Image (cartoon, rainbow, N blue to C red):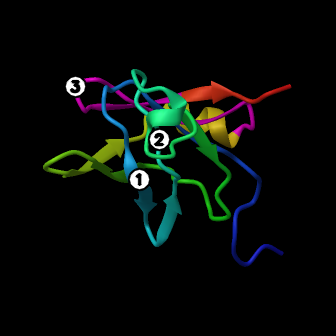
Amino acid sequence: MLLSGCSRQYEIRIVNRSTNDLNMLYITWGNNEVMFPPIASVSAYNGEAYGAPASDVGVYPSCRMPTSDVLIHYLIPGSRPVTNSVRVVLPKEVVEAVQESHSNFMFIVNADGTITPTVSARPR
């Protein structure tokens, strides 16, 4: 019997297509929270991106997967740092694809600051 944790492993990926690095990024839903390392902008070189390894970063949470919406928080560094919090509604087909083990959650941070939820294929 499973009392806590997640019933299966899944990944949450963040793909940064904006021209800003994303620092202190975390995602919350219900009582769950997932932290990410800094994520480079698509225009930054890996060595010059505040320690960000890449513009595509994934983590494997140890909590139940989200099923309706998530809140994504991140800091854009600069002379006047900006903190963003964006609520992202998860489309039914995305949640179903992840639940059926055919894919993982992927959130794309677009150049205009919007965030698009989609799925990413599981590696074979």
- Side of 13 relative to 22 (left or right): right
The residue under the point 22% across, 25% down is 112
Callout 2: SS = loop
Callout 3: SS = loop
Three-letter amino acid code of the residue under disc 3: Asp
Question: First in sequence: mark 3 or mark 2?
Answer: 2
Q: Residue furthest left?
A: 80
The residue under the point 35% across, 42% down is 89
Determine which residue is flagged by label 1: 25
Q: Which mark is residue 52?
A: none
* The quadrant where residue 104 appears: top right
The answer to the question of whether label 3 and label 1 lie on touching residues, with beta carbons closer than 8 A, is no
Residue density around tag 2, few if under 14, some if 14–19, many if 20 or more, within 10 Å: many
Q: Position of residue 57 (x, y in %)?
A: 57, 39
The CA span between labels 3 and 1 is 17 Å
Determine which residue is flagged by label 3: 112
The CA span between labels 3 and 2 is 16 Å
Comparing marks 3 and 2, which lies closer to the viewer?
Answer: 2
Q: Position of residue 12 (x, y in %)?
A: 58, 44
Looking at the picture, tell me which residue is in the foreground, 98 or 60: 60
The residue under the point 61% across, 42% down is 58
Comparing marks 2 and 1, which lies closer to the viewer?
Answer: 2
Q: Which residues are magenta?
A: 100-118
Three-letter amino acid code of the residue under disc 1: Leu
The answer to the question of whether label 2 and label 1 lie on touching residues, with beta carbons closer than 8 A, is yes
The CA span between labels 2 and 1 is 8 Å
Q: Is residue 59 visible?
A: yes
Determine which residue is flagged by label 2: 39
Question: First in sequence: mark 2 or mark 1?
Answer: 1
Residue 82 lies in the magenta-colored region: no
Looking at the picture, tell me which residue is in the foreground, 99 or 104: 104
Residue 117 lies in the magenta-colored region: yes
